[in-house]
Image (spheres, rainbow, N blue to C red):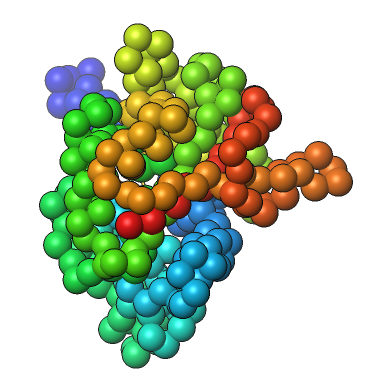
Amino acid sequence: MTTNQKKRTKAISVGRTTRRKTTEADKADRYRLYQESVQDVESEIDFVDETYTRLNGAKARLLREDFCGTANTACEWVRRRKTNVAYAIDINPEALAWGMTNNVAALTPTTKKRVHLLEGDVRYAETEPLDIVLAMNFSYWLFMEREEMLEYFTGVHGGLGDKGVFFLDAYGGYDAPRTIQETRECDGFTYEWEQAKFNPINSEMDCYIHFGFPDGSRMEKAFTYTWRLWTLPEIREMLYEAGFQRVTIYWQGWDEDGEPDGIFQPAEEAEPDAGWICYISAEK
Ligand SMILES: C[S@@+](CC[C@H](N)C(=O)[O-])C[C@H]1O[C@@H](n2cnc3c(N)ncnc32)[C@H](O)[C@@H]1O
C-alpha cells in the first residue's frame, strides 16, 4: 500500500466513525427544558400578585425580574393585566436573546411593548421606582459574601417605590447540604438535580442540572451553579440591615397525599423537613 492509499483509507474511516445518529439530547433546547422542568411562572406570579395586593390594598404595576434568564416570569407579568410593565435583567446575553426570540416574540404586539429586557449586573440596575422586585430560583445565592449580598439587597431597597415589595425564594432542610442526585420525570425527558459538592466551612456548593432522554442520550451539566447555601436567619438579618421594614417567610402546607400543597402562608415556625422551599417578602 502506498502512502497515498493509506491516507485515503484513513480519511474514509474517519468519515464513517464521525457520522453518528442524531440523538434526542442533540436536538433538545436546554432553555426550553429548563422552563418546562424548573419554572412554574403562573403559580409564582399568582403568589406575588396576591401577596402584594394583600400587603398594600392595591394592585402592583411595575415589576423587575432580577437574574431573569429567559425572562419567562416577566412575560407572565405583562400578560396578566394591560397596565402591567416588566423589566427583566440578566448578565448573560445568550439567555436574554433566547428569551427575546421565544418568550417576548410570542406576546401580542401591544403586550411586548410593556416588557423591557436589560443586559447587566443586578447590583447596578437603574429602573424607575418599582412596585415589585423578584429574585427567584435562589439566583441571589450566587453572591457568596455578606458584603456583596448586602450591596445587592440595598440596591433593591433603593430601586423600590414607597410601597415596594421585594420577593425572593429560599430552600433548605437536612438534605440541602448533602451531595445527592434527584430525578423527576417530565414530559418526554428526565430532569436531574445534582448537589455535587458542599464545603461546610464556607457553605459553598456546586449544583448541576442534567437532562436524560428516552433514547438513552443525556445532556450533562446543562446548567451549573456555584452558590452559597444561605440560611433563613442570615437572609432575614441582611434584608433588615439593607433597610426593609418587615420581612415575612411563607411556608407550604401538605395535601392529603403527604405532598407539599403549593399554598404558601406566613409562618414563624416550621417543621425541620428533609427539603423545603419557601417564599420571602421584604417590604420597603
Ligand atoms: C438560576 S438562573 C435564572 C433563574 C430564573 N430567574 C428562574 O426563575 O428560573 C440564574 C441567572 O442569573 C444570571 N446572573 C448571574 N449573576 C448575575 C448578575 N450579577 N446580574 C444579573 N444576572 C446574573 C445568570 O446569567 C442566569 O441567567
Q: Nearer the viewer, residue 228 or 196?
A: 228
Q: Quadrant of residue 73?
A: bottom left
Which quadrant of the figure contains the C terminus? bottom left
The residue shown at (38%, 60%) is 165
Residue 133 image-quadrant placement: bottom left
Residue 232 in sight here: yes
Q: Position of residue 29 (x, y in %)?
A: 42, 53
- Judge from the rendering whether residue 252 lies leftward or rightward of residue 110; answer left or right: right
Residues 107 and 263: in front is: 263
| Left or right placement of residue 280 versus residue 134 in this view | right
Residue that extends furthest to the top in the rendered view of this protein? 201
Q: Residue lying at the far bottom in this picture: please name it.
A: 110
Q: Is residue 164 above or below residue 193?
A: below
Say which of 10 and 62 sits in front.
62
Point out the residue furthest to the right here: 256
| Residue 217 visible here | no
Determine the residue positioned at 84% across, 43% down: 257
Does 143 sit above or below residue 46?
above
The image shows residue 84 at horizontal and vertical percentages of 38, 80
Q: What residue appears at the point 45 percent right and 52 percent down from the top-left corner?
A: 281
